[in-house]
Image (spheres, rainbow, N blue to C red):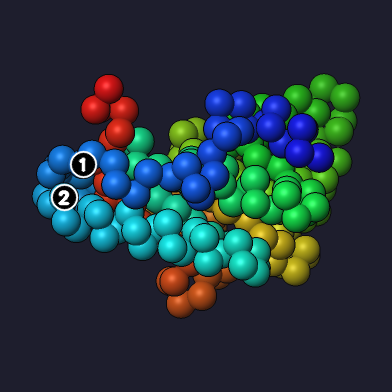
Amino acid sequence: MLSRLRDELGHLADCTFDSFDLDRHLKPFVWDGDGREYSVEQQRRDLENAYDKAFDYTATLDGWLYLFGNYGAGKSHLAAAIANKAASRGIKTTYASVPKLLDFIRGGYKDGTATDRIDALSAMPMLILDDLGAEAGKKDTDELLFSLFNHRSKERANLPTVITSNVHPDHLEPRIADRVYGQTDGGARIVWLPIFSYRRLR
């Protein structure tokens, strides 16, 4: 199970909570998402809050967790850390970028297995979806994602699901946003990371 997950994670395979750098270099910046300027102090607090929320989530692996914010904020690292923690406990875990997951489902159109693929993902004990919003706005994309989210939230008794995105939940397709909000605990499971991108420091 762990070897399969490492293949899915690729370059994120070694991402753990221990390797998440809470003391990384930050710069003040204006995030396009809301046009506000975020100081280094505010970013540091938000970074620590995101780490704590993600780490706490692994204690129960219950419900959904939505991590959103700037590119390079550390969302994928935290999601991979959750995946590694879940798999180390023997929980069957799938990690996939949303574009690749959609390609996997669409690959079943030719041989009639698309529904079976959605069913398999819907029943996955732990599902982690990275980069929601990368293919937003297409009708078939929204339909596939809604079908998957609807199955996991209703028919599969709210199975643990982690989603990363640079899109605020309010700006998702309404039915998908409804599923995200419907699986969170009073907003506590929606975690914002308005953090300066580590990629811009290279």
Query: Considering the numbered disc 1 on the image, is that residue within a helix, a strand or a loop?
Result: loop
- Is residue 81 among the parts visible in the rendering? yes
Query: Considering the numbered disc 2 on the image, is that residue within a helix, a strand or a loop?
Result: helix
Q: Is residue 99 above or below residue 146?
A: above
Q: Is residue 174 above or below residue 114?
A: below
Q: In the figure, is residue 135 to the left or right of 83?
A: left
- Is residue 138 among the parts visible in the rendering? no
Q: In the figure, is residue 113 to the left or right of 76?
A: right
Residue for badge 1:
26
Q: Position of residue 74 (x, y in %)?
A: 40, 42
Measured in 3D between alpha carbons, the distance from the residue under mark 2 to the one under mark 1, in whole angstroms, is 6 Å
Q: Position of residue 32 (x, y in %)?
A: 21, 42
Residue at 65% across, 45% down = 84
Q: Are marks 2 and 1 in contact (CB under 8 Å)?
A: yes
Q: Quick one: quadrant of the N terminus?
A: top right
Question: How crowded is the residue under tag 2: few (<14 C-alpha within 10 Å), some, or many (20+)?
Answer: some
Name which of mark 2 and mark 1 comes first in the sequence: 1
Q: Position of residue 188 (x, y in %)?
A: 44, 71
Residue at 13% across, 44% down = 28
Residue for badge 2:
40
Q: Is residue 147 above or below residue 102?
A: below
Residue 153, disc: none
- Name the image quarter holding residue 157: bottom right
